[in-house]
Amino acid sequence: MSKIGYIRVSSEHQETARQQEIMDNCKVDRIFSEKISGATADRPQLKAMLDYVGEGDTLYVESISRLGRSTRDLLNIIDTLNDKGVTLISHKENIDTNSPTGKFMLTVFAALSQLEREQLKLRQREGIEIAKAQGKYTGRKPIPIDWGKFENLYGEWKSKNITGRDFMRKMDLSANTFYRRVREYETRNGIIEPTSA
């Protein structure tokens, strides 16, 4: 029966001191800590913590937002903890999943957190639409490109002297941008690719 702590901040620039102090006050036996966005599915320390905890253990977090960023994600984690017989205690929301009230409150807080994020995204989209209508928003600026170098490498690529990957690396382009630039170049130069039968 161990006390386990999980600490997460969203970026390398954020400090974990406040969460660490909470863990010290709770006298946890082991801490799993990471600096990574909660929206990222791949959270190595979260996975390690879920693999580590077992029946009778108690997991301490500063707030439920440290665990999951969506209701579904959070409830999946809670289900895993419940299946393993682990109690969750969230400091900020004063939730203890060992009690029916705690389980209910956890679901409510998770739903409210998700609603708040979705409303923020909606407001951002609405703001972009208004800016577009007013001609103030043009999206991301296109990546500047050396068309002379592109033309030379295009010829090499079509002659099969270099691979597409070599072409992308030499132009420092992602695959999506590369193929978009190829289409743009071929359109501008009237190059029509033969279609396969």
Image: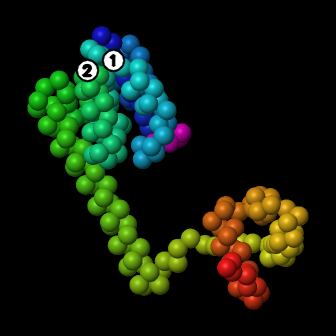
Give left or right: position of 68 versus 34: left
Outermost residue to the top:
1
The x, y position of residue 191, in whole percent, is: 76, 85
Front-lying residue, 58 or 154: 154
The vertical placement of 70 against 167, above or below, is: above
Above or below 96: residue 35: below
- Tell me which residue sits at (45%, 43%) in the image: 41
What is the three-letter code of the residue carrying label 2? Answer: Gly
Residue 84 position within the rendered picture, expressed as x and y whole percent measured from the top left? 29, 22
CB atoms of marks 1 and 2 within 8 Å: yes
Side (left or right) of 109 relative to 70: left
- Tell me if residue 2 is in the magenta stretch: no
Tell me the residue that label 2 is attached to. 85
Q: Quadrant of the C terminus?
A: bottom right
Three-letter amino acid code at the position of disc 1: Gly
Q: Earlier in the sequence, mark 1 or mark 2?
A: 1
Q: Is residue 138 left or right of residue 126?
A: right
Rendering quarter of residue 145: bottom right
Question: Which is more toward the observer, 40 or 82?
Answer: 82
